[in-house]
Amino acid sequence: MEVLDRFAQGDLEAFETLFRQFQGQVYGWIIRIVRDRGIAEDLTVETFWRIHRAHARFNPEGNFGAWARRIATNAALDHLKTARREVALPEDLAARAQPDPAVHREVHEQIERAFRELPAKLQVAATLVFVEEESYEQIAEALGISVGAVKSRVFRAVRLLRRKLKGLGVEP
Amino acid sequence: MSEANNGKIRELLRKAIPPVADRELKRDLWPQMLRRLAERPTQVAWFDWALVALLTIWFFFSPEAIPILLYHL
């Protein structure tokens, strides 16, 4: 019997085989989203915990990697929703902002903070598109939505970010 | 929103938030996974909660049913 069939039936050895085969891939995807090694490791375990619980729903003829990536994306999204840093933007940043390309480090930090304040779903889409330069198709598959929906999230993220950056005196 | 505008946002973001350079997992997480599997919490099924809720409502409206139920337990 194939390892995927055995996994779907709840076989722990098959789960271990899949864990060892895919843990690096799942971790590599999660770290793109959360950008922290320790958190990415914890979320990798959390992802496989969810995979283990959902083994009966897995179709052995399906793509385990794609399924795992979608679960990993949801785990990372859940993390971002609960662990969002609620940091107020300073009022005087506009005065300190400097024109691009010699943007001050402090301004970079404020841009990052403004970005982290975006809703988690928008933040993930924008991170994967703009920072990690993943394809729309791959992001859509990982999020379980259409390519059009990914583009819509990116559009809303840019609009919100632009509004926040204007408040900081940074004109993108 | 134009591609040029997106390009500026992309440039700004990549300066503030550089792409993750090292995406490689440095250690085996299986021992951590095994610990997680071992500490599996006992889960109460939804119908158990529904039964508790029904009993609570029943006892609230008919407190005389409590000793009857205790007798049959």
Image (tube, coloured by chain):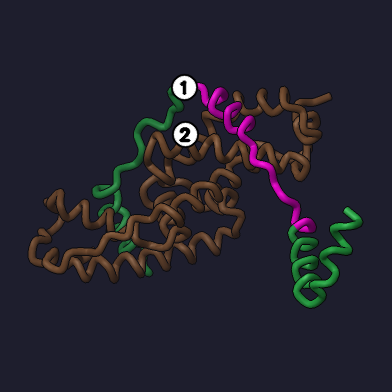
Chain colours: A brown, B green
Q: Which residue is mark 1?
A: B27
Position of the C terminus of chain A, as image quadrant, is bottom left
| Residue furthest bottom as drawn | B61
| Residue furthest right as drawn | B72
- Cα–Cα gap, marks 1 and 2: 9 Å
| Residue furthest left as drawn | A95
x and y percentages locating residue A44 in the rendered image: 52, 36
* B45 vs A94, nearest the viewer: B45
> Mark 2, chain letter?
A
Q: At label 2, which amino acid type do we have?
A: Glu
Q: Which residue is mark 2?
A: A41
Name the residue located 56 percent from the left edge and 53 percent from the top edge.
A143
Q: Are marks 1 and 2 in contact (CB under 8 Å)?
A: yes
Q: Which residues are magenta?
A: B27-48
Q: Does residue B47 belong to the magenta stretch?
A: yes
**Vertical position of residue A74 compared to residue A38: above or below:** below
Q: Does residue B44 belong to the magenta stretch?
A: yes
